[in-house]
Image (cartoon, rainbow, N blue to C red):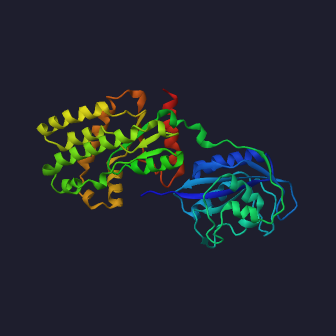
Amino acid sequence: MFIQNQIILSLGSNQGDRTSLLQQSIELIHKSVGTVIRISPIYETPSWGFDSDAFYNCALLIHTSLSAKTVLENTLKIEEQLGRVRSHSENYSARTMDIDVIAFNEEQIVSDFLTVPHRLLHERRFVLQPIVDLQLEWIHPIFKKSFVELLRECSDPSECKKVGTLKHPLQSYRFQDLNFIAIEGNIGAGKTTLVHKISEDFNAKLILEGFADNPFLPKFYEDASRYAFPLEMSFLADRYSQLADDLAQFDLFKEFIIADYHIFKSLIFAQITLESDEFRLYKQVFEIMYKETPKPGMYVYLYQNTSRLLENIKKRGRSYESEIPASYLEKVNQGYFNYTKTLPQDKVLIIDISEMDFVNRQEDYIAILDIIQQKMNSR
């Protein structure tokens, strides 16, 4: 299952337009490191360990699939981009931007390039106070204490004065206005990974297709003609039941619902796998269920070329998928393209992700979010 790392960053600036520099760093982190989930208020604090102008500090919680080392490398680049010039001296100095990796999940990392949790975390009020405002359920892996407890016991007498707030990058997305987003794609396109990521980042209700639990699926790949009909009927029943139950709870969720399928995919695959007489019967049952199923506010199809699909299928290593031919994937793509033509075009979005890697490249993930929001804006 796809799981993102939860990282806490501490930001500080005491040169130039401090508020602007903090805001710029947040935008750059969001676009190149990880999704910014929570932002603390800005605190003004005296310089720590040297005499200089007061700092503006804040803290962030971000989600990312990047390693701790890559996160550090990317944040150092952002510091340089915002004008920081590092001194070879070990003494503290004034700086336009300072980004510290405070915590990486609840792991303890000690290496030549990074130590987390930050070794001076418990001694710095200007770090602890903003992080406490993030309201995180986090326990220090060494001290076994929460941020609230660490702040309460901190001996640093420095005053932390709240002086402002910062704009949240996720505020530019209004996905909750759609209520229900269905993200579809061919086998191996990455749709499930994407909906996992969006669900975690936006606190959305997640609906995943339980294909791995279908007992007919391995049998179908061994003997398609024999098991196609029971496979497609079982998928249809499961999809209808799940969507009917989950989508009936629209009003219970503050954000929105996102799924890695919609029930119409049943007809697309059935048309490819079933004989004509079986398909006619199947379609009659399907149309009854389809009429009663809530429709997505946005239907997103992730297109990926066949060679990339085959690479992805090979990487995930499911034995029953190993013999899927390219011709089958091409038929599935065509089936989806034909279906999207029948939908209201203001609710359809096709995104070519053949050259994207939204897991390892944050900028690609943000590009997908931007494309979805742009489609909403154009309606």
**Can residue 97 be seen in the rendering of this structure?**
no
Side of 134 where 193 appears, left or right: left
Q: Nearer the viewer, residue 48 or 124?
A: 124
Q: Residue at x 31, y 28 (%)?
A: 342
Residue under the point 29% across and 30% down: 291
Is residue 17 positioned above or below 108 on the image? above
Relative to residue 153, is residue 310 drawn left or right? left
Please say whether residue 93 is visible from this viewpoint: yes
Residue 334, located in which quarter of the rendered image? Answer: top left
Horizontal side of residue 182 vs 47, given as left or right: left
Quarter of the picture containing the N terminus is bottom left
Residue 266 vertical position relative to residue 177 in the rendered view, above or below: below
Q: Is residue 356 left or right of residue 233?
A: right
Residue plotted at (69% across, 55% down):
132
Report the residue at 69% width, 60% height from top.
148
Dividing the picture into quarters, in which one does residue 223 lie?
A: bottom left
Residue 79: image location, x then y, percent: 70, 55
Q: Position of residue 308 (x, y in %)?
A: 36, 52
Q: Position of residue 239 (x, y in %)?
A: 30, 43
Specify the quadrant of the image occupied by residue 80. Answer: bottom right
